[in-house]
Image: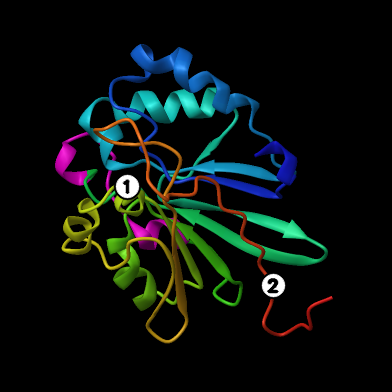
Amino acid sequence: MNTLKADLVCHTSDIADGTAERRCAQATPLGTVRATRARVYVTGNHEYYSEAQGWVDLMDELGWEPLRNRHLLLERGGDTLVVAGVDDVTAEASGLAGHGAHLAGALNGADPDLPVLLLAHQPKLVDRAAAAGIDLLLSGHTHGGQIWPFHHLVRTDQPALAGHSHHGTRTLLYTSRGTGFWGPPFRVFAPEITLLVLRSPHRPTP
């Protein structure tokens, strides 16, 4: 990943099953991931199966920016991108105080004329993102179905399985297959790391 020399590295969560304390040694290598401007992270449903706040704290210690219903500004060459993130949609039901997916809170104070990149673990948040005029939503969760025929079950719960899809009049969703697995410890035809190059539609490609 570091050879890509990315400006922004995004982790859309589900780091591991279990607590951060138990899995700390396995997660610590995430601290070696490099970005020229920012590394950002949002919570996923598997964090809420164990100890979400512990994972948020660990990622913070490893130098990642936990975007818990907030945003930061990424600047390059005179342009500014709003990078926002929300807690997983399962957060509120977890009963963990202060956790819940609040899109309005994530965008609070952002200039409405700036483009917005939103991180949300589950693609099913795309309807809310489209209604809010989000330009690009990055999600994970599906593992791309991981193995056949699991993808059929995923499609009953999520609007997208993997890759690009368009929603509403302006919102683009990219659903990453991710790098890990759930259940059987293997992947079939599932790429791991995605490099996205963002270009303004108002400027010619150099």
Q: Is residue 175 left or right of residue 71?
A: left
Label 2 crowd (10 A; few <14 / some 14-19 / many >=20):
few
Helix, strand or loop for disc 2: loop
The magenta region covers 92-107
- Residue at 28% x, 21% y is 18
Q: In the rendered structure, does residue 95 fall within the stretch colored magenta?
A: yes
Q: Amino acid at mark 1?
A: Gln
Label 1 crowd (10 A; few <14 / some 14-19 / many >=20):
many
Q: Quadrant of the C terminus?
A: bottom right
| Along the viewing direction, whichever of 92 and 123 lies nearer the viewer | 123
Count numbered badges in the picture: 2
> Does residue 193 lie above or below 80 as drawn?
above
Helix, strand or loop for disc 1: loop
Q: Is residue 64 left or right of residue 131?
A: right
Q: Cα distance, mark 2 to mark 1?
A: 30 Å
Q: Amino acid at mark 2?
A: Arg
Q: In the rendered structure, does residue 182 fall within the stretch colored magenta?
A: no
Depth-wise, is mark 2 or mark 1 nearer the camera? 1
Q: Earlier in the sequence, mark 2 or mark 1?
A: 1
- Residue at 71% x, 85% y is 202
| Along the viewing direction, whichever of 91 and 166 lies nearer the viewer | 166
**Image quadrant of residue 114?**
bottom right
| Along the viewing direction, whichever of 185 and 159 lies nearer the viewer | 185
Residue at label 1?
Answer: 146
Residue 199's tag is 2
Q: Is residue 84 left or right of residue 8?
A: left
